[in-house]
Amino acid sequence: MIYWAPLFHFYQPPTQTPAVLMKVSNESYRPVLAVFDEFPNAKATFNINGCLTEMLALYGHTDVIEGMRKLGEKGQIEFTGSGKYHPILPLIPREEAERQIRLNFNTNRQYLGDGYKPRGFFPPEMCYSSDIVKPIVESRHKWIIASGIACPVDWPMDVIHTIDFPDEEIAVFFRDDILSNKISFKDLDGKGFIEHLKQLRNIEGDVYVITAMDAETFGHHIQHWDKLFLSQVYETLVPATDPPKVMREQKPPADQHRKLFGYEKSPDTEDIKIVTISELLDIFPRGSKISPKPSSWSTSADDMKMQNYYPLWKDKNNPVHTMQWELLGLTIDCAHKAVDLADNPLSIQFAATARELLDEALHSCQFWWASKKPMWNINMIDKGMTLQREVVLNAYKSISVSDCKPEIKKEYYYRVVAGRHIFDQLTDYLYTD
């Protein structure tokens, strides 16, 4: 058998506008869910970050949430864990990573119900390092997915390797980067993808293939790709509906299958089965204990050689990234200090505001839009900076009205000044570059 496990990643940043969210929901989220409604035997793994779930509820797109909830309850899809505000987990303090994972679970469980019971974990942007394994294991996830470039051994297709961790082990899956990118950039249509899967018959024994990409690929990034790729593939590999009992007993003729593109479930695809990633755990044996390489799903071989593991979010040669992360470091420090020092109702109030805003301020898009590979959007960068400035404003206000020593207030005022200087430098860069 050839097992295909597709993963769809749903995400919009907390700074996204309602208009763009509506556009993406109409062009992508609703059409993708419609495909799964049309093909109830189709399966997939979904990752949706909690900040998007909340925004969908806030801006009236509850039908999207309800559609996912129903698919999860039926077992047609499984959900993964992640960080609520899509932070780059290897680049933030561990306590923040742990908090993001908890927040993501609580938010999605609230909106998606009992069908939200993730066994696997999707690190935002597939940014992996050994530092993130501990909070993932401790939050009771059984597997993690990483980019194919992170694989340190021969490509696994018939075994599932595990990450060595004290007293525990966690399975690690690798996405097929080449195949996933071909789909994402429209270099491979549905027919070509199925032909690729058929070629795997030449490999002895059962094998599996994992593809993973943004859900927004289907319909938003590529117009009608939900129909021209997803529907075409699912129509070929699975029947549109379960046939009635009488038809199951009397094998229906092939021409009774619905045809959108001239494809139908045929004998030469019967050895291809679509599964969730977690189902692979029950099918394939365990392999070796390995240590995946630090990387992301946008890291190239040249980046790896230069130890530039997260180039779209913290490029060593990108001055904007350098300033952004310096500012974020000051922001985190101020917020943590405010929470530690809060000792009266007013300081507690401001510290709580700073703490809540900090969760959002960790989102990855502000760095991605500053990557210039080729992404550059001064407004998305500025929105990230503004969030951080609001954290610092409330954090220092909390410190200043607390009963802490004057020396501490003076020390953190200097940090506010330093942060303001970095903010101004970044703003000047946006003006002139």
Image (tube, rainbow, N blue to C red):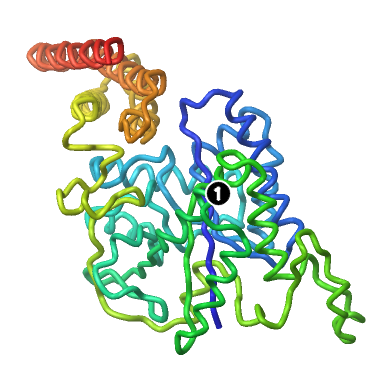
As drawn, 293 above or below 31: below
Residue 15: % across, % down: 46, 25
Residue at horizontal 29%, vertical 66%?
151
As drawn, 138 above or below 127: below
Q: Is residue 143 left or right of residue 411?
A: right
Residue lying at the far right in this picture: please name it: 246
Q: Residues within 10 Å of mark 1 (few under 14, many from 20)?
A: some
Residue at horizontal 23%, vertical 60%?
293
Q: Dividing the picture into quarters, in which one does residue 65 lie? A: top right
Residue 163: % across, % down: 28, 69
As drawn, 223 above or below 212: above
Residue at horizontal 59%, vertical 69%?
194
Label 1, on which residue? 109
Residue 305: % across, % down: 16, 53
Q: Amino acid at mark 1?
A: Arg
* Disc 1, SS: helix
Look at the image and tell me whether residue 186 can be seen.
yes
138 or 195, nearer to the observer:
195
